[in-house]
Image (spheres, rainbow, N blue to C red):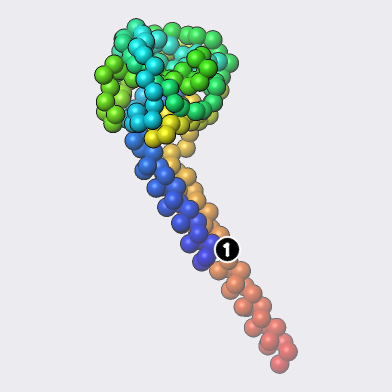
């Protein structure tokens, strides 16, 4: 019972962490049929980040530099911010331009400037919704040089996560934890009943 209770508390903590992270930006890169699609969603808190100037959005993917850009218009005006920490790359591939894109301009560059930079639409206000896509037609993870995994970039107030390939949802982890707990609890109860039965049989033999 104690094991199950501890696992339940762990699941609740994980759920709480997920809820807190819901406000962050997540870029999901998946293989969809014969194409690779990058989808940006969420909001970003600019607190603690430093404005480093205006840039033109590159609607492309460069895993070796940890760069991904999504949005409707290549070369759209975006503002760059420093102040994040995170991995330097998410693959070995060189620069590949997107076939097309939709939504607002957003980009992350992990290492080309020596430290991660995040780019948001010019005039962006903290907490505003960010949503956009980039399509890489006729491409695969292999041809783009992507390494599957979850790459997290943290600022003082928020996170930007790049999920490449299938990454389990938090709800799935919670169900898995609770399921393991339930199995463990059932096994312990079964063992306790078996031990009690053995003791009764042994006691009867002694009589």
Nearer to us in this view, 8 or 84: 84
In the depicted structure, whether residue 207 falls above or below residue 176: below
Instruction: Assign the C terminus to one quadrant of the image.
Output: bottom right
* Residue most extreme to the bottom: 207
What SS does tag 1 mark? helix
Q: Residue at x 49, y 15 (%)?
A: 113
In the depicted structure, whether residue 158 falls above or below residue 8: above
* Residue most extreme to the right: 206
The answer to whether residue 146 of the structure is visible from this angle is no
In the depicted structure, whether residue 157 falls above or below residue 28: below
The image position of residue 127, as x and y in percent, is 28, 31
Q: Which residue is mark 1?
A: 187
The image position of residue 137, as x and y in percent, is 42, 11
**Crowd around label 1: few <14 · some 14–19 · many ≥20 (10 Å):** few
Q: Residue at x 44, y 51 (%)?
A: 13
Nearer to us in this view, 53 or 137: 53
The image position of residue 63, as x and y in percent, is 52, 17
């Amino acid at each position: 019972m104690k094991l199950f209770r501890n696992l339940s508390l762990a699941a609740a903590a994980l759920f709480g962490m997920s809820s807190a992270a819901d406000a962050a930006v997540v870029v999901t890169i998946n293989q969809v049929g014969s194409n690779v699609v990058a989808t940006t969603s969420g909001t970003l808190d600019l607190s603690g980040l430093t404005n480093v100037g205006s840039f033109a959005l590159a609607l492309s993917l460069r895993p070796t530099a940890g760069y991904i850009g999504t949005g409707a218009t290549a070369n759209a005006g975006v503002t760059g911010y420093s102040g994040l920490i995170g991995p330097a790359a998410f693959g070995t591939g060189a620069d590949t331009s997107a076939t097309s894109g939709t939504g607002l301009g957003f980009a992350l560059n992990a290492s080309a400037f020596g430290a991660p930079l995040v780019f948001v639409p010019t005039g962006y206000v903290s907490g505003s919704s960010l949503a956009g896509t980039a399509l890489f037609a006729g491409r695969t993870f292999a041809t783009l040089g992507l390494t599957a995994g979850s790459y997290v970039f943290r600022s003082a107030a928020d996170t930007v996560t790049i999920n490449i390939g299938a990454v389990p949802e938090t709800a799935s982890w919670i169900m898995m934890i609770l399921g393991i707990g339930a199995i463990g609890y059932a096994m312990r109860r079964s063992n306790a009943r078996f031990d009690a039965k053995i003791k009764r049989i042994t006691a009867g033999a002694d009589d």
